[in-house]
């Protein structure tokens, strides 16, 4: 089921559920029963066939293999397991809410390093015994540090509301079953046992169909959980918790992580105090201008079918907290956070325990980022040396400008971006990057460059409007800022869908010749020739229905493996990521490795023809 079919089915079901809610619930229940029935049928059929054939041992081992696949332990949440002795007041809060909402008891309370919270039910014996599970409540320390105790109470009530016995148990059961089927299909995708072949085709059809069919129920479950939060913590606390989390989420993305990587990425090993730093910074108040800006960004997003959670605006409206427009007051400054209240003097100790876990988990990923940083630094040094003795191509100059901004600062990159635009006034990436730098310098000339980039590339509309909105807000020009906020609201969902279509590659994707000039092809070939692992390389243009005026290129390579050292092995995804980052090319390029699973691409690209290197 592709995205268009998925969205169309959900839209039909939303209408049907409004007209006939009991009929919709019956259909979802029957569809859920179909999944279980198929599993039982396969078990019974296999046992019967091999038993009558006298192959009892084969029957036993085959059924055992299938049972192992279905019953194998599900992944349990990572983090620090909390005990009642360590945080008695936190457990008392959970006990109170569990009793009020008539939810199952939680076997494990886990503290992790995410700005999030959640409930998870892990079947003890697999999907066939979905009613007998271990119950986990996962609480993010950054989330607790971002909220007041009262707001945190609302978030916990929301999460427990998904399992509440006060409301529709059927809805809660379907909510959990969606996650169970998703995990099971992931298991089949990654498992190579023969038993999974009996289920893979069925589940590849069933899981997305069940997910779409039950989507309306899952969305309603989110609103029901919000009502639980309002009932047990108060509407204001529930609404302000959502607002604070929206603001803090943008803070982490726009400020904390960006500054963190700038400071730490030149170290080969990840730091050992990341969560401690995050907790310390989250306790500090955010400037009113940034908070208002990020809240407006959150209110600009619209509910879609990518996530069962409604958008912030719809959730606040359901609370009655957004009766007119978006002129929301910011929540009051938090004097004592939930983390400080519940952990007290032990807060630094819990942060340090998460520091160690974060460092261990991120180390393999960090090594890849560090190596990527070193390659980019080397590429910048090569381009810098080249620029002194010869004239760079337009795309090489663009890459040089981009890397110069990264390694020596934005101001040094301005003349390089200006040179690209002088040679090619419509260069999208150069206009956007230069415009962003100028706006950060409070230079009105940046507006023209951002507008030019958005006009040529609709995918830049959302990030471009966000930049212009923030700029006009900082200048006190609220009327102009409002124009760009409205554009975000109008185009958000359409652009999100377009991005998905443009990023996907499947056996139904169609291609044409790339039509790039020889200078750019030669530059790409020069880079590819530095990779002895590449046996062949193909370049083609993907046919797209969304924004066809902006080409999407696909670079496909066939690898040869030159080293048997497992420490030097790169997955196909890692190899493609390195290769694409190394290209001095500003166009939109997707990369794939042609292997035994997608060998048909090789013949397809040869017919175009798309071979550029061998």
Image (spheres, grey):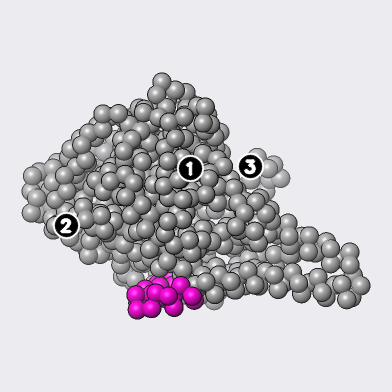
Q: Please, what secondary structure does the residue beneath circle 2 have?
A: loop
Which segment is the magenta one? 1-27
Disc 3 packing (10 Å; few <14; some 14–19; many ≥20): few
76 in relation to 211, above or below: above
Which circle's residue, 3 or 2, is located before the other in the chain? 2
> x, y percentage for residue 105?
53, 45
Give the left or right position of residue 141, taking residue 125 as reference: left
User: Residue 581 bears which disc, if any?
Assistant: none
Quadrant assignment for the C terminus: bottom right
Estimate the spatial distance between the alpha carbons at disc 3 and disc 1, rounded to whole Å. 36 Å
Which circle's residue, 3 or 1, is located before the other in the chain? 1
- Whether pointer 2 and pointer 1 mark residues with C-beta atoms closer than 8 Å, the reply is no
Q: Please, what secondary structure does the residue beneath circle 3 have?
A: helix
Would you name the residue on which mark 1 appears?
138
User: Mark 3, mark 1: which one is toward the viewer?
Assistant: 1
Give the left or right position of residue 595, taking residue 389 as reference: right
366 in relation to 205, above or below: above
Would you name the residue on which mark 2 appears?
323
Would you name the residue on which mark 3 appears?
568
Q: Residue, x 63% and y 66% (percent of image)? A: 597
Which circle's residue, 2 or 1, is located before the other in the chain? 1
User: Mark 3, mark 2: which one is toward the viewer?
Assistant: 2
Residue 255 forms part of the magenta stretch: no
- Whether pointer 3 and pointer 1 mark residues with C-beta atoms closer than 8 Å, the reply is no
Q: Main secondary structure of the magenta part?
A: helix
């Amino acid at each position: 089921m592709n995205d268009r079919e998925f969205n169309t089915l959900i839209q039909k079901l939303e209408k049907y559920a409004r007209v006939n809610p009991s009929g919709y619930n019956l259909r979802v229940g029957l569809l859920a029963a179909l999944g279980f029935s198929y599993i039982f049928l396969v078990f019974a059929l296999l046992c019967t066939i091999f038993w009558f054939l006298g192959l009892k041992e084969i029957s036993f081992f085959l059924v055992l293999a299938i049972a192992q696949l279905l019953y194998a332990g599900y992944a349990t949440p990572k983090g620090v397991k909390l005990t009642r002795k360590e945080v008695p007041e936190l457990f008392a809060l959970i006990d109170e809410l569990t009793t009020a909402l008539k939810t199952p008891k939680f076997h494990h309370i886990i503290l992790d390093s995410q700005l999030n919270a959640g409930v998870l039910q892990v079947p003890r014996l697999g999907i066939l015994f979905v009613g007998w599970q271990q119950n986990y409540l996962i609480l993010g320390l950054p989330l607790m540090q971002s909220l007041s105790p009262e707001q945190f109470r609302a978030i916990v009530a929301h999460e427990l509301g998904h399992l509440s016995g006060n409301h529709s148990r059927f809805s809660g059961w379907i909510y959990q079953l969606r996650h169970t089927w998703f995990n099971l299909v992931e298991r089949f995708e990654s498992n190579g046992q023969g038993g999974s072949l009996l289920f893979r085709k069925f589940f590849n059809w069933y899981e997305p169909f069940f997910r779409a069919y039950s989507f309306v129920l899952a969305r309603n479950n989110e609103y029901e959980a919000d009502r639980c939060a309002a009932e047990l913590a108060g509407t204001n606390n529930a609404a302000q918790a959502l607002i604070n989390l929206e603001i803090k989420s943008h803070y982490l993305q726009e400020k904390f992580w960006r500054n963190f990587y700038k400071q730490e990425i030149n170290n080969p090993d990840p730091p050992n105090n990341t969560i401690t730093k995050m907790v310390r910074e989250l306790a500090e108040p955010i400037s009113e201008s940034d908070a208002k800006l990020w809240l407006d960004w959150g209110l600009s997003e619209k509910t879609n079918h990518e996530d069962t959670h409604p958008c912030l605006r719809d959730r606040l409206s359901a609370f009655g907290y957004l009766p007119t427009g978006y002129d929301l007051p910011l929540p009051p400054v938090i004097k004592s956070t939930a983390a400080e209240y519940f952990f007290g003097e032990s807060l630094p100790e819990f942060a340090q325990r998460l520091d160690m876990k974060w460092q261990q988990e991120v180390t393999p990923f960090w090594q890849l980022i560090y190596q990527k940083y070193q390659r980019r630094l080397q590429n910048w040094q090569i381009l810098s040396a080249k620029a002194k003795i010869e004239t760079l191509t337009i795309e090489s100059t663009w890459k040089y400008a981009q890397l110069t901004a990264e390694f020596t600062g934005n101001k040094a990159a301005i003349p390089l971006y200006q040179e690209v635009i002088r040679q090619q006034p419509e260069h999208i990436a150069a206009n956007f990057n230069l415009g962003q730098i100028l706006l950060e310098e409070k230079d009105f000339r940046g507006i023209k460059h951002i507008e030019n980039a958005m006009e040529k590339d609709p995918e830049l509309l959302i990030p471009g409007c966000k930049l212009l909105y923030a700029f006009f807000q900082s200048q006190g020009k609220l009327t102009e800022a409002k124009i760009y906020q409205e554009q975000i609201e109008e185009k958000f969902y359409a652009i999100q869908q377009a991005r998905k279509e443009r990023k996907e590659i499947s056996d139904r994707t169609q291609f044409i010749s790339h039509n790039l000039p020889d200078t750019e092809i030669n530059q790409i070939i020069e880079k590819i020739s530095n990779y002895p692992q590449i046996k062949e390389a193909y370049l083609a243009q993907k046919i797209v229905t969304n924004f066809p005026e902006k080409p999407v290129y696909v670079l496909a390579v066939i690898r040869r493996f030159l080293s048997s050292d497992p420490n030097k092995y790169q997955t196909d995804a890692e190899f493609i990521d390195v290769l694409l980052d190394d290209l001095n090319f500003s166009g939109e390029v997707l990369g794939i490795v042609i292997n035994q699973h997608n060998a048909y691409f090789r013949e397809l690209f040869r017919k175009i023809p798309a071979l550029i290197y061998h």
